[in-house]
Image (tube, rainbow, N blue to C red):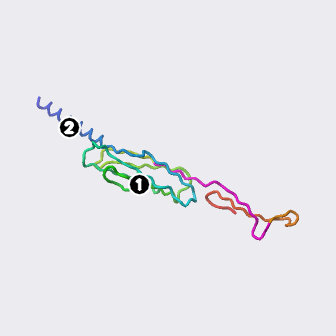
């Protein structure tokens, strides 16, 4: 009889610990990020703000952690840890990346570790619109057929966003 009472108390304690661990689930706001960048633009995408919190019913002694996993050179989150509510800065640096789509994940966790929340991050890098500029060659004014000669010279620049041809 005493053994079954002890088992009941032990099971109740385990249930309470499990419930506490579930309450230590980090909450993210916002739940995802989308950044865009156009090649050859001088301004990098503005940093994003992420707020991580724990439920008010979470026991004391828990802190929040934040990291990019797996680590990616173009994505950072700072600071790496702190008390709830934790305000984080999410920064992307597209320098050196080719046009295309990139994805990463910010992992929010707790210390001591109980559970994690994943925050997806997307970065879209595009080329600028193509353009062409046509102008007379240096030293050539206006071209007049029959007066300016048989072989007029024209200079042009075509920009694709990656390199210029002339």
Q: Are marks 1 and 2 in contact (CB under 8 Å)?
A: no
Quadrant of residue 151 in the image? bottom right
Q: In this rendering, is residue 138 above or below 163?
A: below
The N terminus lies in which quarter of the figure?
top left
Tell how many labels.
2
123 inside magenta stretch: yes
User: Is 143 on the left-hand or right-hand side of 45?
Assistant: right
Residue furthest right as drawn: 146
Q: How busy is the neighbourhood of tag 1: few (under 14 within 10 Å), some, or many (20 plus)?
A: some
- The image shows residue 129 at horizontal and vertical percentages of 63, 54
User: Is 146 on the left-hand or right-hand side of 128?
Assistant: right
Residue found at x 70% / y 58%: 132
Cα–Cα span, label 1 and label 2: 38 Å
The residue stretch that appears in magenta: 121-141
Q: Is mark 2 on a helix, strand or loop?
A: helix
Residue furthest bottom as drawn: 139
Q: What element carries label 1?
A: strand
Which mark is nearer the camera, 1 or 2? 1
- The image shows residue 149 at horizontal and vertical percentages of 86, 66
User: Is 158 on the left-hand or right-hand side of 56?
Assistant: right
Residue furthest left as drawn: 2
> Which disc is residue 13 wearing?
2
**Mark 1 lies on residue:** 89
Q: In this rendering, is residue 58 above or below 152?
A: above
User: Is 166 on the left-hand or right-hand side of 18?
Assistant: right
Residue found at x 25% / y 45%: 59
């Amino acid at each position: 009889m005493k053994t079954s009472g002890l088992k009941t108390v032990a099971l109740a304690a385990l249930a309470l610990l499990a419930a506490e661990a579930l309450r230590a689930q980090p909450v993210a706001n916002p739940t995802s990020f989308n950044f865009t960048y156009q090649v050859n633009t001088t301004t990098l995408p503005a940093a994003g703000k992420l707020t991580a919190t724990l439920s008010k019913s979470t026991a004391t002694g828990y802190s929040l952690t934040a990291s990019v996993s797996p680590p990616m050179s173009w994505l950072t989150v700072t600071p790496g840890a702190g008390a709830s509510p934790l305000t984080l800065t999410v920064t992307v640096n597209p320098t050196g990346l080719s046009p295309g789509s990139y994805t990463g994940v910010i992992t929010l966790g707790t210390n001591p570790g109980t559970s994690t929340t994943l925050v997806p991050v997307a970065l879209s890098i595009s080329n600028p619109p193509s353009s062409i500029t046509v102008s007379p060659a240096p030293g050539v004014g206006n071209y007049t057929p029959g007066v300016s000669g048989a072989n007029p010279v024209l200079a042009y620049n075509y920009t694709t966003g990656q390199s210029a041809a002339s």
